[in-house]
Amino acid sequence: MISGVLMVSCYTFNKPDKPKHLLSKKEMVNIIIDLKLMASSNGSNRKILEDNGVYSDDYIYKKYHIDSLTFASNNAYYSFYINDYEAIYNKVKDSLEALNEFYKELEKEELKEKRKQDSISKIRKKDSINALMVKDSVALRATQDSIRKLKLNRPEPRLIEPVSDKAAQSR
């Protein structure tokens, strides 16, 4: 019982002051979403971002026209009110999950389109090969016809007549 009273009394004494520039819950959700996205992109693309002059926290602060102190004081203020903070983070979580699903679906659609384009390419390639083969077969046929014509102009070979009549008698 005494520990409960102490916790409640400490709870009220350490209550953070309301920030001069209090961000709405919606603004906090958007800022935290952006911070999470930037943090995840920093892991794989940090060098690319830095080469282009993009530093995650600074970018977010400029985007929302705040500074790090404003965000920190708002974060401390909302974290004191656990129900509000939980609601903010639930919205962040839901938004990130929805965004993840959106990009998964987009990726599936792109993959489906790529497969379709690959199939079309394969068909065109086969058609072009078949067209070459048809041309080759037409040329081959023309060559064969000309060979046949050459053969037709020659006299057909005749059988050799037997020299002796014995072969003719044995038949």
Image: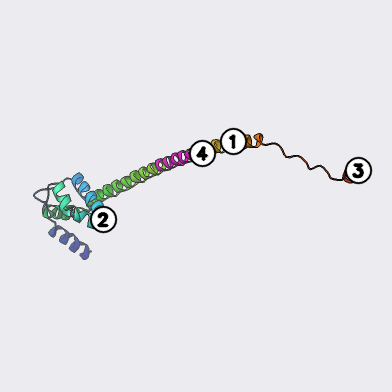
What residue would you read off at disc 3? Answer: 169
**Marks 4 and 2, how far apart at CA:** 46 Å
Residue type at mark 1 is Ser
Q: Quadrant of the C terminus?
A: top right
Q: Amino acid at mark 3?
A: Gln
Can you say whether 111 is above or below 45 in the image?
Answer: above
Mark 1: secondary structure: helix
- Circle 3 sits in a helix, a strand or a loop, which is it? helix
Residue 45 is labelled as: 2
Q: Which residue is mark 1?
A: 146
Quadrant for residue 79, please give it: bottom left
| Mark whose residue sits in front, 2 or 1 | 1
- Dot 4 alpha-carbon crowd within 10 angstroms: few under 14, some 14 to 19, many 20 or more: few
The residue depicted at 43 percent of the width and 42 percent of the height is 118
Horizontal and vertical percent position of residue 17: 10, 54
Q: Position of residue 71 (x, y in %)?
A: 15, 53
| Most foreground residue, 22 or 12 | 22
Judged from the image, the secondary structure of the residue bearing numbered disc 2 is helix
The secondary element bearing badge 4 is classed as helix
Disc number lying in front (4 or 2)? 4
- Cα separation between marks 2 and 3: 99 Å
Position of residue 142 in the picture relative to residue 98 (left or right):
right
Q: Residue at x 16, y 46 (%)?
A: 63
Proximity of marks 2 and 1: CB atoms separated by less than 8 Å: no
Q: CA distance from mark 3 to mark 1?
A: 43 Å
Distance from label 4 to label 3 (Cα)? 58 Å
Per the rendered image, the range of residues in magenta is: 113-133
Calculate the distance from the C-alpha at mark 2 to the C-alpha at mark 1: 67 Å
Q: What residue is disc 4 on?
A: 130
Please, what is the dominant secondary structure of the magenta stretch? helix
Q: Earlier in the sequence, mark 2 or mark 3?
A: 2
